Amino acid sequence: MWTTKNVSRHRDTARGFSMVETLAAAAVSVTAAAAVVPVTMNTIHSFRISGAAHGLVNHLSVAKMRAAANFTRSRLYVDLAANTYHVEAWQKTTSTWMTEGGTDQLSSGIAFGFGGVSGAPPNTQGTLAQASQCLDNLGDAIANTACVVFNSRGIPIDPVSLAATATDALYLTGNGGVYGVTISATSRVQLWWTAAGSNAWMRKQ
């Protein structure tokens, strides 16, 4: 049988959180979120620049295969100003470079550059530099570009002399780090990373 005492006890146990308790819980949640958001954003950005670097590696592989498959020259064309890149193949019949596939754009906050790094990865380039400038159909250099060119055997070559080269590389910077993609004379592609402003290059997979 319910009594006034029972009703009173029921009301006491059924009541929710007080305003003070609710505000305290909200404050804790906001503080935790404020601490987590920067870490999450850094992680996302790290994934983006890593993905962009692996994208360059994949496109270099495609350019090398295109050259061998079509028995012609092929290249990875990089627009350093627009932060874009795509594969092109040399058409012998028309003496022109033709784009194959689409053009890829780097994510916001990522750009082609050195991030304050002054030295190249070990046993790659003598001097830190992006790959040589691309040449147009007439053989003239195109400003703000970099090209890795492969001959029909899949060997990287100098775009002017067409001689084999071992100094091609492309560099990305963003989120306090720099990725380097280097190509050896045997067309071996290697991926590197170092913190911005540091020359402590580490091999990446």
Image (tube, rainbow, N blue to C red):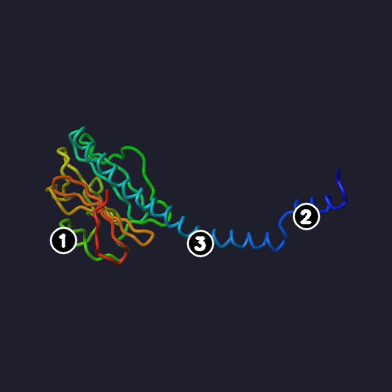
Where 126 falls versus 150 (above or below)? below
Residue 24 sits above or below residue 91 on the image: below
Residue carrying label 2? 12
Residue 85 horizontal/vertical position (percent): 33, 47
Name the residue that disc number 1 marks.
126
Above or below: residue 47 compared with residue 177: above
Q: Position of residue 33 (x, y in %)?
A: 54, 58
Of tags 3 and 2, the one toward the viewer is 2
> Which amino acid, mark 1?
Gly
Q: Residue furthest left?
A: 163
Distance from the alpha carbon under mark 3 to that under mark 2:
36 Å
Q: Earlier in the sequence, mark 1 or mark 2?
A: 2
Which residue appears at 15% of the width and 52% of the height?
166
As drawn, is 14 to the left or to the right of 153? right
Q: Nearer the viewer, residue 70 or 2?
A: 2
- Per the image, label 2 sits on a secondary structure element best described as helix
Residue bearing the label numbered 3: 35
State the residue at coordinates (24%, 66%).
Answer: 118
